[in-house]
Image (cartoon, rainbow, N blue to C red):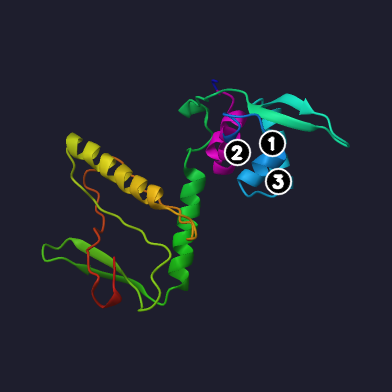
Amino acid sequence: MMVENARTAAVFTDPRLRRLLLWFVRRPASVAQAATAWDMDPRRAHYYVQRLERLGLLRVVETKARAGRPIKLYRAAGDSFFVPAEAAPRGFGDELIREVRAGLELEFARSEGGMLFTAARNGSPLARIIRPRGDPPRAREFWRVLDLRPGDVEALTRDINALFNRYQRAATGGGQTYLVHAAYALRQASDGVADNARDDSRNGRTD
């Protein structure tokens, strides 16, 4: 299904709406089933489903009679959806990026540590987070400025995917949910300067 309307395309930039819609791709299901599957408040699930239906992304495919209101079964309007980049009102990961940034800021605010800035022997800037001893951090951020050939970029992509997949497959439940984000982008300014972090785990201190 081609999605070119900006209001409809906005659904795919919202992780909650996107996840809910795509759950209806493979099966007809009720609002109650969707709420249970995603551990969502039924009223909120009903609100989201109604919104998706108004936008034409969900359709009622069956109605089951029962005492009181009949049960509506919904299914996604397409098996897949293509959203042109120019139709999206914002980036597809912007909501998640804001969530990551909020988590990092909260962790930094609760910490009794801070940032240590210095310079390497060649004069390049170095920065690292200084943390007190105790519980491991609940949020961390990593930055590197790398000089990569095309083949290196492909290898880095494979390595990041493999690492994420390994931890995703190993998840057995019972832990805490973390939002993990990795990205790279070609720098537009060749003379840009950034503080490359330095590995140093001594004395409870980490980058």
Q: Which residue is mark 1?
A: 49
**Residue 74 belongs to the span the image colors magenta:** no
Residue 88: x %, y % from top left: 52, 31
The CA distance from mark 1 to mark 3 is: 9 Å
Residue 72: x %, y % from top left: 75, 31
Kind of element beneath mark 3: helix
Q: Residue 117: which quarter of the image?
A: bottom left
Query: What's the residue type where badge 3 is placed?
Result: Arg
Identify the image quadrant of the C terminus: bottom left
Q: Which residue is mark 3?
A: 44
When the figure is inspected, residue 86 is found, relative to residue 128, above or below; the finding is: above
Kind of element beneath mark 2: helix
When the figure is inspected, residue 25 is found, relative to residue 175, above or below; the finding is: above
Q: Main secondary structure of the magenta part?
A: helix
C-beta proximity under 8 Å, tags 1 and 2: yes
Residue 182: x %, y % from top left: 35, 48
Q: Which residue is mark 2?
A: 20
Residue at image x 23%, y 74%? 202
Q: Is residue 188 visible?
A: no
Query: What's the residue type where badge 1 is placed?
Result: Val
Query: What's the residue type where badge 2 is placed?
Result: Leu
Label 1 environment density (alpha carbons within 10 Å; few <14, some 14–19, many ≥20): many
Residue at image x 24%, y 53%? 193
Residue at image x 43%, y 73%? 111
| Magenta-tinted stretch | 3-22
